[in-house]
Image: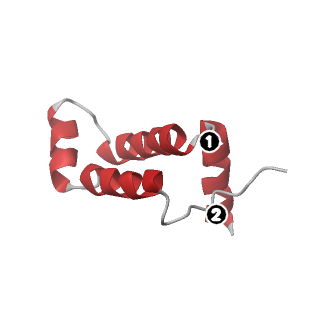
Amino acid sequence: MKHRLNLDTKDPNYILLKEIFKIIDSRKSQEILAYYGFKKPSITIFTFKVIFISTFLGFKILFILKEIKSKETS
């Protein structure tokens, strides 16, 4: 049985990830992506977030996407 994607708010990786997400979600980041030719910055930002979650918390990308999809449908 796999663990759900429940995050501990006191985990240092989670705290750092939260700060990174604040920067990624900023308007300045969207402007930078648009400047470099990314047509849909929101999709690019979503992709970056999934990659960062995978890197920092050690989950496989496929597992993260399944968790997101299951939370959207429920």
Quadrant assignment, res 62: top right
List x then y, in percent, for residue 1.
Answer: 85, 50
- Please report the residue visible at 78 percent of the width from the left and 50 percent of the height from the top: 2
Circle 2 sits on which residue? Answer: 71
Question: Could you classify mark 1 by the number of other residues whose Cα lies within 10 Å: few (under 14), some (14-19), or many (20 or more)?
Answer: some
Q: In this view, does 42 lie to the left or right of 30?
A: right
Question: Could you classify mark 2 by the number of other residues whose Cα lies within 10 Å: few (under 14), some (14-19), or many (20 or more)?
Answer: few
Q: Is residue 14 above or below residue 37?
A: below
Assign a secondary structure to mark 2: helix
List x then y, in percent, for residue 27.
Answer: 18, 54
Assign a secondary structure to mark 1: loop
Q: In this view, does 59 lie above or below 71?
A: above
Q: Which amino acid does label 1 sit on?
A: Phe
Q: Is residue 43 left or right of residue 54?
A: left
Circle 1 sits on which residue? Answer: 59
Label 1, label 2: how far apart the Cα atoms are: 17 Å
- Please report the residue visible at 28 percent of the width from the left and 36 percent of the height from the top: 39
